[in-house]
Image: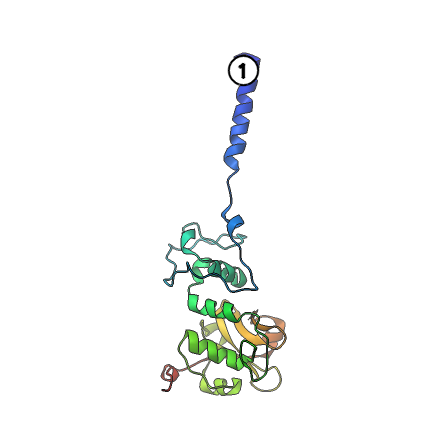
Amino acid sequence: MPATAQKLKNTVSINDGINTRQSPKFIDYIEIKADRSAELSTVSEEPVKSTKPVELSGHPLNLSPELNIENISSLQFKYAQLLDRNVEFVKNISLFRFIDEWWGTRYRYGGSSKKGIDCSAFTGLLLGTVFAVKLPRTAREQYNESEKINKEDMLEGDLVFFNTRGGVSHVGVYLGDGYFVHASTNNGVMISRLDDPYYEKRFISGGRIPAQANTTEE
């Protein structure tokens, strides 16, 4: 083959290779904002179905290859990142929608509205709305009402109790994987970790409301 023809062939081959590698990434088209509620019009209430998840170390969205991206909402992406878990394990849409709606609401002692809410009012409202569980008003009363459970036995929806200023003085709701949501005095409604030095030192126990208490009076 003449040298000029061979050079032209090599040039076409290289250019073709570059073009095939230039494909759009889906993450460029996803917008997630922490300061506003997620758009939920396309969220399915059904649990995400996929085959056994495959851990992808370092993947920014913790996606499994088998997961159908069309079945996942921006709300699930957001909380998968916050909780460092695979998106298919962000299943309780009602729970995370509730958290998203209240996220950043400032702390106010005795408060129970979007203008300000305290820790026990927040846990009572969350469990009542998401899990249909009625709780007494204060953290101490919620502690007395619950069955005490060890940290390693806690499940999503259990209560977590802390001694922040003497006795049972703070409460949150466990989300799994060491995370809990609560109305903190400094930052309002937020998600924290149990192994944070501040909370780890002050942790008292987990609490589970007995099944017979999961009714609302008429």
Helix, strand or loop at disc 1? helix
Q: Residue furthest top?
A: 2
Q: Is residue 30 visible?
A: yes
Residue drawn at x 49%, y 88% as measured from the top left? 141
Q: Is residue 154 above or below residue 144?
A: above
86 w.r.t. 108: above or below: above
Q: What amino acid type is highlighted by mark number 1?
A: Ala
Left or right of residue 93, residue 121 in this image: right
Residue at x 38% of width, y 55% of height: 50
**Number of dots carrying numbers:** 1
Q: Nearer the viewer, residue 211 or 27?
A: 27
- In percent of width and height, residue 140 lies at 52, 87
Q: Which residue is mark 1?
A: 5
Locate residue 209: give its quadrant.
Answer: bottom left
Crowd band around label 1 with a 10 angstrom C-alpha radius: few (<14), some (14–19), many (20+):
few
Residue at image point 41% right, 52% down = 70
Name the spot of residue 63 as percent of width and height, x first.
47, 53
